[in-house]
Image: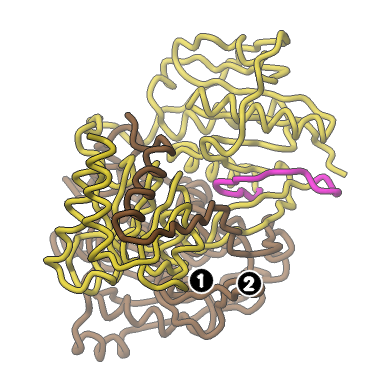
Amino acid sequence: MTRMIVLLKDIIDLTEMKIDPATRQPRTEGVKRRISELDERALEAALQLKEKGGGEIVALSMGGGKTRTALLKALAMGADSAFIVNDDGLAGVDALSTSKVLKAALEKIGDYDLILSGEMTLDSLSAQVGPRLAELLDLPQVTYVKRIEIVEGKIRAERDLEDVDEVVEVEMPAVVSVVREINEPRIPSLMNIMKAKRKPTEEWDAAALGLLADELRANSSVEVLKVEAPVVERKRIVIEAATVEEAAAKLAEAIVGEGVLEG
Amino acid sequence: MSVCKNVLVYSEDRELVLQLLGKGRALADKAGGELYALLLGSGITGAGELFGYGADMVYVVDDPKLAQFGLEPYRAAVLEAAGKASPGFILIGATKRGKELAARVAAALDTGCMTECVRLDIDGEGKLRAERLTYGGSTISTQVSKREPHVATVPARAFEKLEPSPRSGEVIELDVDLPDARVKILETREKGKGDLGLENAPVIVSAGRGFKEQGDLRLLEELAEALGAKMGCTRPVAADLGWMDEWIGISGRKVAPKLYVACGISGTIQHAAGIRDSQIIVSINSSETANIHDMSDYSIVGDIYTVLPALTKAIKEKVG
């Protein structure tokens, strides 16, 4: 039986994020939270593998006080159980420390054949946790996956690279990260949402994993100093004319003049 | 102050190597260290040309096992070079392969990594400071890396290569016992050139909620035809109305055309994040206060239902 662990990060819903016009800083307080979209697609991939060949799906997340609520969706979609590492002392740690925490959690969960996640989370865009776990666990990694199946006990996947698509094969256990092309995540039914609340969920703090939160925070490398919307540098020329035809002609001339239609 | 001052750069993309050398030279000079380039592959040529672009030393690992990218052999080669050069700073080209490699190398060295940095500098304490996109591309984060070696990945065109100068240096062949790749490549398919998606389209015309009905998109189609453009739209037009399959923006496609024409689009930060890299942005929106005008090079405050047909006609007359 294939045991799949899907890494899910609970982030703010970026479609609802606003920028404060005065400070240019994002307003993240009070914004609805959700599972990072590509991680949700990794879960959908796991669900489809389970539907074809059987197996068990475990959701794993490192998050905060609201992560339990965000993970209800994963359980409603079809994950069998969920584990959450929730420790205030780990707030703001980087990918280096996060991957160490997740490694400890994976070891506590025990046997697994496949570790799945999105190629990156959409808040940090750092694309590191999957490969870092592969390094720490000494596992093969298959990144940028847009199609996946299990053939004779091995992973067969299609990778979406810049210049080529690559069909690869690898033994399990392995770490796999997916791109958005892989699937469209299902929308859970009301009945499954009700059932989700009764599925097993366990929360751990750093100590439960045998880790020291203070040490992980101190050894974290990348510190975020500032987050700001960029200043837009555009010409901002508003075309004015007596008639629509005249304005259109002026705009057409400007477009042609920019040389952006050549080639 | 930083103990390790050398800078090591690597990318499988030779043009990107030159850009990394441009930035790497500035960092090495500031730190007071040397600049090392690493070339990996099978049958490597042209190592010497890297000196002209700023390298002090070029490491070469030339091995049949590196003919095709495989994570384990490439990782081993980079770690070997890092062991030899003792760099304080490692810059890796942020191609897809480069990003997965950088994360592995950083994990193996028990250090941090900053992904797709568009600005890099060494701060007063000798630490690497970077700017990079976050929150789906709608914000820029300023970050500092505190552990050595400082690792960063750098996308194409973030930094400029130097004008070649008559410099010289040393090419050193590293002899590394490379492991086999654990992932077996069964097949490699070239991406079809005819199948250019929105990401590669040179001209895009795009629809927002200013369109009242799906049938009205023919106005956009006609403009697209006149401009030789691909069509896109905002999230509500695709996700809520279902008029198109995919959208441009924070949770959708990110595009970088030479020309982006936003039609009836208000200009949310979510949409802005998807079109930021466009060379020229043109907008048509009936509201004078719509945000889209602030993020445009040229805009017309007007009704798309009258402006689009007039623009289509004007473009046809201009372009013939």
Asked whether disc 1 touches disc 2, contact meaning CB atoms under 8 Å apart, the reply is: yes
Q: Furthest-right residue in view?
A: B1
Residue picked out by circle 1? A62
Magenta residues, as a range? Answer: B111-126
Please, what secondary structure does the residue beneath circle 1 have? strand
The chain letter of the yellow chain reads B
Please, what secondary structure does the residue beneath circle 2 have? helix
Q: Quadrant of residue B36?
A: top right
Q: Is residue A250 left or right of residue B159?
A: left
Q: Identify the chain of the residue marked 1, using the numbered disc in the image.
A: A
Judge by depth and name the residue closer to the eye, A73 or A108. Answer: A73
Q: Quadrant of residue B250?
A: bottom left
Q: Identify the amino acid type marked 2.
A: Leu
Q: Residue at x 47, y 76 (%)?
A: A84
In the drawing, what numbered circle is on residue A90?
2
For chain A, what colour was chosen?
brown
Q: Is residue B132 above or below residue B121?
A: below
Q: Residue at x 54, y 35 (%)?
A: B157
Q: Identify the amino acid type marked 1.
A: Met
Crowding near pointer 1: few (<14 within 10 Å), some, many (20+)?
Answer: many
Q: Residue at x 83, y 42 (%)?
A: B2
Label 1 or label 2, whichever comes before in sequence order: 1
| Image coords of residue A122 (percent x, y) | 45, 62
| Image coords of residue A47 (percent x, y) | 22, 66
